[in-house]
Amino acid sequence: MKLQIIKRAHGGGNFPQSQERLVNANRKGGYFSFNSKCIRELGLTNETRILIAKDEESRNDWYVAFGEKLDGMKLRAQGKPTSGYRAQYKTAAIEILDSVKAEKSATFLLAAKPTEQDGIEWYRIMTATPIRKI
């Protein structure tokens, strides 16, 4: 037998950055989290608000909109330096997790291009294929 010992990484924040835009829904805290790729590409800040919506014509189509003037939940920074943002949106978090049959949480891809409706850009949350589901 020939074993290769994997060295333990030291320090926090040295993790590789995600190559995909990810959104995580958490049942216990009732929040949605957005990763660093979302921050960079969508220009998220502490002033950004989010709206979550589901398509009434298709039970598993969920969308999120970002903007400072939206009548939604305000994002809050996670970590120092900021590694992500989260917003409490308990009703939506529970509904989306129920729709994908996740007990605790699930992570989804966020669409690259938005769909515009009523002057708001909506990004689809790809619920059909969760990246991770607990």
Image (cartoon, helix red, strand yellow):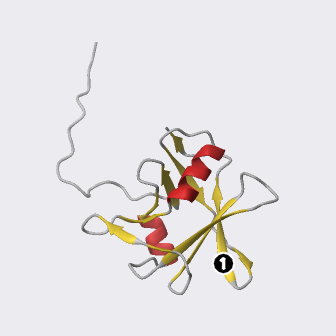
The N terminus - image quarter: top left
Query: With 37 as the anchor, is 53 left or right in this view?
Result: right
**Residue found farthest to the right:** 57
Q: Residue at x 21, y 45 (%)?
A: 9
- Does 70 appear above or below 62? below
Q: Which residue is mark 1?
A: 121
Residue 65 image offset from top left, x and y in percent: 60, 73
- Does 116 appear above or below 83? below
- Does 11 appear above or below 134? below
**Residue found farthest to the left:** 10
Q: Residue at x 49, y 38 (%)?
A: 134
For residue 115, which quarter of the picture? bottom right
Query: With 124 as the anchor, is 84 left or right in this view?
Result: left
Residue 20 appearing in the image? no
Tag 1: amino acid: Glu
Mark 1 is surrounded, within 10 Å at the Cα level, by few (under 14), some (14 to 19) or many (20 or more) other residues, namely some
Query: With 16 as the anchor, is 79 left or right in this view?
Result: left
- Does 75 appear above or below 91? below
Residue 125 image offset from top left, x and y in percent: 63, 59
Residue 23 appearing in the image? yes
Q: Residue at x 39, y 59 (%)?
A: 17
Instruction: Pick the residue in front: 44 or 62.
Output: 62
